[in-house]
Amino acid sequence: MKHTYIIAEAGVNHNGSEELAFKLVDAAYNSGVDAVKFQTFKASKLATSYAKQAGYQEKNTGKTESQLEMLSRLELSYDSHHKLIGYCKKLKIDFLSTAFDSESLSFLVNDLGLTRLKIPSGDITNAPLVLEHARTGCDLIVSTGMATLSEIETVLGVIAFGYTVDKESKVSIEAFQAAYYSERGQKALKEKVTVLHCTTEYPAPMEDINLEAMKTLAASFKLEIGYSDHSKGITVPIAAVAHGASIIEKHFTDSKQRKGPDIICSMDPKELFFLKKMVFQLV
């Protein structure tokens, strides 16, 4: 088996603290993983003051507040991003981040120079933002939590269109389909896209994981596959590697005693190190 690329998902587990973000980079580096990934967004572009937290977010953060208030607390400045990517380069660990809005996407590509991007499950039906991602020419990791096979094919069509069709060309569902089925579109997808199976529950219970879905994704789209994990512990991501995952993405924290929306499904540094060791032995 070939190398499995392990992404330590810091996400928003820094709780808006630059100091804690640096500690998470250190923890990821010391665990021997390939990359540490954050989330880049402008809270004001994602939520209104009227949007409520999801139930699991209220429970896991220990706060009752609006989505806007929560996201504002978790937002990292662009200056912090510059410092973090510089530190990652020094340590020789890959820096990745997910952009949740157009401004953040432009910043990651044009200011930080990222060449690999992650499209989260929540944006898989956000065709305009997906198209912007594809038009950067970057390699893309596409998470598919909650998406049907039809929706995944549609988003791959958007990506194929963005990779292969002139920016002045008319955008339409038919054009996306034509790009997806074209020889050039398929070639671009195979060269640049990895599709991740994902169960969108925090934490994801074992009975809902269904790693067999990875085989369905591989058979349906003939692309590299991986797994974005929200379960507790290391059992499921290790099993995902045995199912052919070329990428594993797993939330982690420096301490499970912290409060945060994703802490409950996060590994601590010891678990992350053990995951890396087990995956290395498996492949």
Image: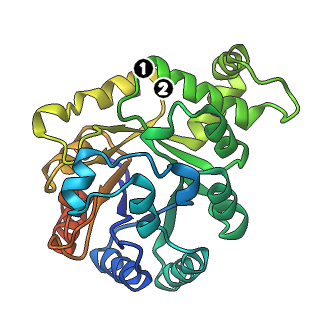
Label 2, residues with CA under 10 Å away: few <14, some 14-19, many ≥20: many
At label 1, the amino acid type is Leu
Q: Residue at x 54, y 79 (%)?
A: 80
Q: Nearer the viewer, residue 214 or 123?
A: 123
Residue 4, position in %: x, y?
Answer: 35, 54
Choose top left, top right, bottom left or bottom right for residue 178: top right
Q: Residue at x 67, y 41 (%)?
A: 134
Residue 161, position in %: x, y?
Answer: 71, 29
- Whether label 2 touches label 1, CB < 8 Å: yes
What is the distance, in whole Å, between disc 2 and disc 1 at their CAs? 5 Å
Give the residue at mark 2.
152
- 42 is higher (above) or lower (below) than 140: below
Residue lying at the far top in this picture: please name it.
174
Task: Tell me the SS state at disc 2.
Answer: helix
- 175 is higher (above) or lower (below) than 249: above
Give the residue at mark 1.
149
- 261 is higher (above) or lower (below) than 237: below
Q: Is residue 73 left or right of residue 44?
A: left
At label 2, the amino acid type is Ile
Q: Nearer the viewer, residue 41 or 9?
A: 41
Q: Residue at x 48, y 68 (%)?
A: 75
Task: Tell me the SS state at disc 1.
Answer: helix
Residue 265, position in %: x, y?
Answer: 20, 55
Q: Residue at x 70, y 69 (%)?
A: 111
Choose top left, top right, bottom left or bottom right for residue 282: bottom left
Residue 104 seen in the current view:
yes
Residue 113, position in %: x, y?
Answer: 67, 66
Label 1, residues with CA under 10 Å away: few <14, some 14-19, many ≥20: some
Count all numbered tags in the image, as a single digit.
2
Q: Is residue 110 left or right of residue 13?
A: right
